[in-house]
Amino acid sequence: MPEIWAGRTEQLSDWRDVLRPRLQAGLFERGRTILGEPGLGKSSLVRRIAAQAERDGDWVTPQIRLALGTDPLKRIAAEVLRLAEEAGLAAARENRITVLLDRVQSVAASGVSVGLRDRVGVEPHIALTEVLVEVGHAAIRQGRVVLIHVDEVQNITDENLLSQVLISLGDAITREVDVDVPAVGVVTRSLPIAVYLTGLPEFDDRSGARKGATFARRFATTTLEPIDDDDLRSALRPLIVSGWEVPSPEGTMGLVRLSPDAAETIIDVCRGEPFLFQLAGQRAWYAGDGDVITRDDVQKGWRQAQPEAISHVERILERLPQREREFVTAMAELPPRDRSQGQIAARAGFAKATDAGTPSQRLDRVRGIIGRGKVYTFRHRAIEAFLTSDWPTIN
């Protein structure tokens, strides 16, 4: 299948033009927290950034995906040990580094427990920070940047563990060290360590509001929105003009192209959702067997995908707290020009308009589903289409 990437230029250029150059220069940069509803491509975005970092020779952890109930320090420790080995610390003769590696090895093997703390004589998250600092020193010596990606961070439900993870990673990226610069002397610089945290919007409550200003000083949060149609159009254009090489049954290479009206149909049905964009494209690719993917192919494939598209949007709506779901439903029932906070609140049955303040703020700031203003709008276009039309039905 064709490899298509659409949008997210702001986040990609942030790594290329801001974060990595500043870290290489020894300047402090906050970690990046990328949140959003399911299907918006959070993990895919950071995996793409990580792939670019690896091509540039940086030290990158794989996607550290945290399932519910996982000991996050244990998972992160295992990947930090791999970075330490890549940095050459495993062969270090300094007793201090050997002791640190042994402590983190214990965390990676056993996780966090009272017995472990008693045995190593130091909190596991502190040992983890110190090994990261040593990896950072090695990265400075070798001209590398370290990238750590922790995914599904909303699954860290234990407040104590969440605090330890954020403190450990935050202490590492804010640590300043002295280095000798030829002809200049000793210069203080930050370690070249980048941390990306990705997950659902619920993480914003546990990390930001409950951890206070410290987290905000150490991590910059972005809430992803659906992708603009013009970005999707640009991503599909090469498939229309140049085509995609595929092997033929005879062993030669042929080209498959996408017709312009087929591209527009894909854009229309996916409503800016990366997951639905991938789903529509995949089903269209397999729907026909000609040299051109036609609009009929897209329609045929999408009809097969409709149950999955419905389930995707329904899962997002079911995740919303009751008041937020009532607000969104009432907003969808009103004509677009009448979607003011007062009218939405009245339609939802709230006692007064101000009762809609908190749900609407969260739907806007935390979830990125609506946009507030004099007239409220939907930023999540698949939810709007699902609630206000016969989408995902296609003629």
Image (spheres, grey):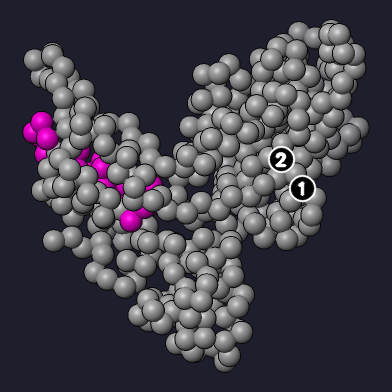
| Residue 84 visible in rendering | no
* Sequence-wise first label, 2 or 1: 2
| Image position, residue 52 (x, y; %) | 51, 25
In this rendering, the answer to whether 328 lies above or below 78 is: below
| Image position, residue 115 (x, y; %) | 84, 38
Task: Look at the numbered discs 2 and 1 and tell me whether their residues touch, using CB distance below 8 Å.
Answer: yes
The residue segment tinted magenta is 271-292
| Image position, residue 92 (x, y; %) | 80, 9
Total residue callouts: 2
Residue in the foreground of this view, choosing between 276 and 174: 174
Q: Amino acid at mark 2?
A: Arg
In this rendering, the answer to whether 223 lies above or below 234 is: below
For disc 2, the marked residue is 30
The secondary element bearing badge 2 is classed as loop
Task: Determine the residue positioned at 52% across, 81% down.
Answer: 341
| Residue 294 visible in rendering | yes
Q: Taken as a whole, is the magenta stretch helix, strand or loop?
A: helix
Task: Determine the residue positioned at 80% across, 50% down.
Answer: 214
Q: Amino acid at mark 1?
A: Arg
Q: Is residue 61 left or right of residue 341?
A: right
| Image position, residue 145 (x, y; %) | 66, 23
In this rendering, the answer to whether 349 lies above or below 275 is: below
The secondary element bearing badge 1 is classed as helix
Residue in the foreground of this view, choosing between 381 and 246: 381
Q: Is residue 279 magenta?
A: yes
Q: Is residue 338 magenta?
A: no
Q: Is residue 204 left or right of residue 348?
A: right
Q: Residues within 10 Å of mark 2 (few under 14, many from 20)?
A: many
Q: Residue furthest bottom?
A: 351
Task: Determine the residue positioned at 75% across, 60% down.
Answer: 210
Q: Is residue 281 left or right of residue 318?
A: left
For disc 1, the marked residue is 217
